Image (spheres, rainbow, N blue to C red):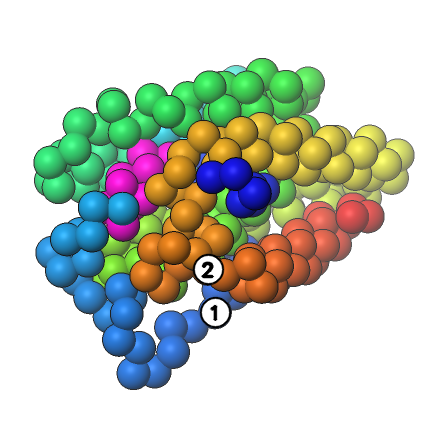
Amino acid sequence: MPGKRVIVRFMTSSDKPDNAADAPETPAGHTGVAAMDWTAASADPQYRAAVVDLLGALAYGELAAFERLAEDAKLAPTLADKAELAKMASAEFHHFERLRDRLAGIGEEPTRAMEPFVAAYEGFHKQTAPSDWLEGLVKAYVGDSIASDFYREVAVRLDSDTRALVLTVLDDTGHGGFAVEKVRAAIDADPRVGGRLALWARRLMGEALSQSQRVVADRDALSTMLVGGVADGFDLAEVGRMFSRITEAHTKRMAALGLAA
């Protein structure tokens, strides 16, 4: 799609803290795709391709989140912390199963739908491997929440069946409150930790934007949904407003952690 490039993060999604971005509500009396069910909306082959991309990106993101949380649990300082992360990892895997089953249910091979997004996810995680427990918490809380905010923005433009599934798998796994509690306690104990973690959070943002740019550029149906062309897709002005909402939520999220944005 020459001339249409949108920067969106397709990494992981897990929880929605209280200060997450609130996606715009579907207008009352809406008669476009958002008012249709999957059977009606999927008659448009371009819309169907966009949804398959979206579900594939989400599914691999949930699988990657499961793997990462399981790894992060190894860094946990206490047995209670380890158990808490294991519980969150289990919730992420359940979300993955829901998305995998949905892809299969609409006649798509789940692995094939996820494959286009593997390189971007793996590239991001390779560049942002946490060096300790606290960096892992910040990565999950800040990075994953940005992805969740984006998917909620997209969800209001989806058919009713797909929208319900996407919002369900974005349910809070408890990581947000857990991360805030642990990071703020660490900063209270040693204020110098705050500066290091603030720099780390900024790096996460930069890497996420860099990796995601390639994802959207490579997936025509998905990028068309974002900038317009599929019924009820975002126009460019709405994309700008969407990112303003996500950026504002990110700033609030950083403040909740006790970090400077």
Give the mark nearest the N terminus, 1 or 2. 1
Is 50 a magenta residue?
yes
Q: Quadrant of residue 123?
A: top right
> Residue 79 versus residue 72: which sits nearer the camera?
72
In x, y percent, where is residue 156?
A: 38, 63
Give the residue type that dot 1 points to. Pro
Give the class, few, some or many, for how many residues have Cα within 10 Å of label 1's Cα (few <14, many ≥20): some
Disc 1, SS: loop
In x, y percent, where is residue 209?
A: 63, 36
Identified at 26% across, 75% down, the residue is: 31
Residue under label 2, please give it.
234
Q: Which mark is residue 4?
A: none
In x, y percent, where is residue 65?
A: 44, 30
Q: Quadrant of residue 92?
A: top left
- Up/down of 155 relative to 132, above or below: below
- Up/down of 154 relative to 183, above or below: below
Give the residue type that dot 2 points to. Phe
Disc 2, SS: loop
